[in-house]
Image (cartoon, rainbow, N blue to C red):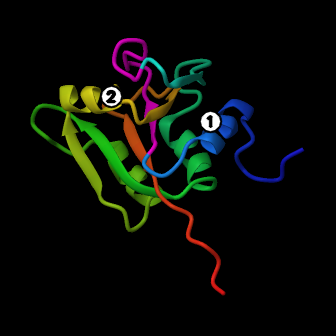
Amino acid sequence: MLKSELIHPTILQVLGASGHGSGILIADGNYPFITRANPAATRVYLNFMPGLLTATDVLKGLVTAIPIEAAHVMTPADGSDQAIFSEFRQLLPGLDLQKMGRFEFYDMARGSDVSLVIATGEQRIYANILLTIGVVPPPAP
């Protein structure tokens, strides 16, 4: 029995096996999970129904479990901010969102460092975020 906020067994297993620099993709319901993510990454399908679970629901759980040193987001060709970006920023205080074009984002998500791909029921477009796991500093003496 776990007391932490994040309790999904597969996600916890992959996070435990991942390390500094590993990537975690949280993707919306339109994302091409099979063709545009690292084929060796573990896939977790949380897209039970449209709107359940959202990208921000998943991010809320992840921020309680891992240090995050970088976050990349997919933008449309004009590079504009999407409404969900403000929610990402609220959940990742002090961290700048690094904007990437669609195909550049796809290329990064196919990288060998991506260890976990989480499919969500998020209906907003461009609601994809690629997190880079940071380090856990040693305790102070």
For the point 62% across and 35% down, the residue is 14
Q: Main secondary structure of the magenta part?
A: loop
For the point 56% across and 70% down, the residue is 137
The residue singled out by tag 2 in the image is 125
Is 29 within the magenta? yes
Q: Nearer the viewer, residue 93 or 141?
A: 141
Marks 2 and 1, Cα distance to the nearest angstrom? 26 Å
Residue range of the region highlighted in magenta in the rendering: 22-38
Q: Secondary structure at mark 1?
A: helix
Q: What mark, if any, has residue 1 been given in the picture?
A: none
Q: What mark, if any, has residue 14 been given in the picture?
A: 1
Q: From the viewer's perspective, is 65 left or right of 103?
A: right
Q: Secondary structure at mark 2?
A: loop
Disc 1 residue type (three-letter): Val
How far across and down, in percent of the image, does residue 27 sit?
A: 43, 29
At label 1, counting other C-alpha atoms closer than 10 Å, the crowd grade (few under 14, some 14-19, many 20 or more) is some
Q: Nearer the viewer, residue 31 or 12?
A: 12
Lower sequence index among marks 2 and 1: 1
Q: From the viewer's perspective, is 33 left or right of 49?
A: left
Name the image quarter holding the C terminus.
bottom right
Q: Quadrant of residue 73?
A: top left
In the image, is residue 85 above or below residue 96? above
Total tally of numbered discs in the picture: 2
For the point 38% across and 40% down, the residue is 130
Q: Quadrant of residue 44?
A: top right
Q: Are marks 2 and 1 in contact (CB under 8 Å)?
A: no
In the image, is residue 18 above or below residue 86? above
